[in-house]
Amino acid sequence: MGLVILCVFVLTAGSSPARQPSRQAQWVSGPSWTLPETSVPRTLFGVTINTGTGAMPAFRVGAVRLWDSGTRWAEIQPERGTFDWAVLDRHVDGAEKAGLPVLFVMGGTPAWASPAGPLSPYPDGTRAAPPDDLNDWDAFLRAVAKRYAGRIQAYELWVLGNDRRFYAGSMETLVEMTRRAGRIIRAADPEATLVCPGMGQLWTAEGRRMFQRFTALGGYGHCDVAGIKLHQRTPSDPPESMLELVSTVDRAFHRAGIHPRLWNTGTTYAIRLQGPLDETRARNHAVRFFLTGLYARNLNLERMYFYNWGGTKIPIVLQAVGGVPTGAALAVEQLQRWLVHARSRSCGHGTAINLPENVWQCEVSVAKPGDHHEAAIRWTVGGTAETTAGPRVRAVRRLDGTTETVRPGDVITITEEPILIESRF
């Protein structure tokens, strides 16, 4: 998939040792990487809140993003000079009680700020155009940043900057809006993280062209993080296919000479039109969505916001508002338990790491009170494969919470459901 890696040979838990790398590590293109160990951040596991209730998930997550949550610009400021903070207050209060950092998303221009602007996909008259007078944009930014300084951790400066259904202005104007937002929000809250306007439609030539235009105009110089919209072409495609988009973005940044941090802040709007996955595939794909984020650590990807939490008209449902977590949500929670004390060190797949071609793996070191060990999370992108337990393997853990003792030389069957293979130091 064109991923850039540090070294093509890694030592995998539960398989025969690979050849050791040469004294000088070589940068080549291939399906694996090793990097210095880094803690797996809790915030890797984000969700987009899709309700205006202020309720938070009833299963473990690490961060929340607000969109389709009653918090569009037009909903907060229905008239010039008039603000309705009730819904956003509920969200921020709920997130604070749950100990979750908030990513607030800008977007949805009020009709009064762009009377002749094209309509957005929303039925309330929200405009896709930027405001006719950017001073209205400035005033909204000041009001939000002043009210929530120290309480909202991060701001995504437009929901979809390269999708004309959500932003119909020029890239020059979007860069100027980004510049103004950076100046205003940083003045009110120097600790806030600024996420550049989300860039989606990356499977299309037009979406890539607009993203590259924003890049060429220097837009990423005004924020701390690049927001990109990772998704499969269809929900039934393997989540790992999203890595093609990460590589596309990385190449564009490399050509521009920049290397920003990346947050995956969404999906495609067409997700609402696609049918649900069966329970088994929904569970496996939800877990592998976040593993794909861990796999892309070598390309600066830090967070994955799953779309969405609270809604039910989507291919994978984690939890309906007022309901209980689904099997997919509980599996995502189990993945987080595996990684809560983990430090990531390598990921790879196939023959490059001495595994069958369809097997993917991420390796970690785990250090918790009374137990230090190595582990590998392993799965396939389709079908099954058999691997042999290495000399230090001691157990296999599954997403349903069960554990199986394993001895060296035992056959371990790998399926599309990720498993955790523990090894002694």
Image: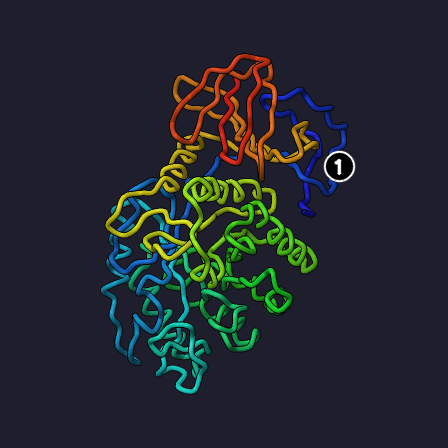
Location of residue 93 in the rendering, given as x and y in whole percent from the top left corner:
24, 53
Assign the C terminus to one quadrant of the image: top right
Q: Is residue 299 above or below residue 24?
A: below
Question: At 48% across and 37% down in the image, what residue appears?
Answer: 40
Location of residue 150 in the rendering, given as x and y in whole percent from the top left corner:
33, 54
Q: Nearer the viewer, residue 288 or 200?
A: 288
Q: Residue furthest bottom?
A: 116
Q: Nearer the viewer, residue 114 or 139?
A: 114
Helix, strand or loop under label 1: loop
Location of residue 196 in the rendering, given as x and y in whole percent from the top left corner:
50, 62
Q: Nearer the viewer, residue 88 or 271?
A: 271
Horizontal side of residue 218 vs 2, given as left or right: left
Question: At 47% across and 42% down in the image, what residue appears?
Answer: 281
Q: Nearer the viewer, residue 178 or 321?
A: 321
Question: At 53% across and 19% down in the image, what residue appears?
Answer: 423
Classify 10 Å Cα crowding around label 1: few (below 14), some (14-19), many (20 and above): few
Q: Is residue 384 above or below residue 230?
A: above
Q: Is residue 146 above or below residue 418?
A: below
Location of residue 189 in the rendering, given as x and y in whole percent from the top left corner:
37, 59
Question: At 39% across and 41% down in the image, what residue appears?
Answer: 328
Res 191 visible? no
Q: Amino acid at mark 1?
A: Gln
**Model colouring:** rainbow
Horizontal side of residue 99 vs 362, given as left or right: left
The residue to which callout 1 is attached is 26
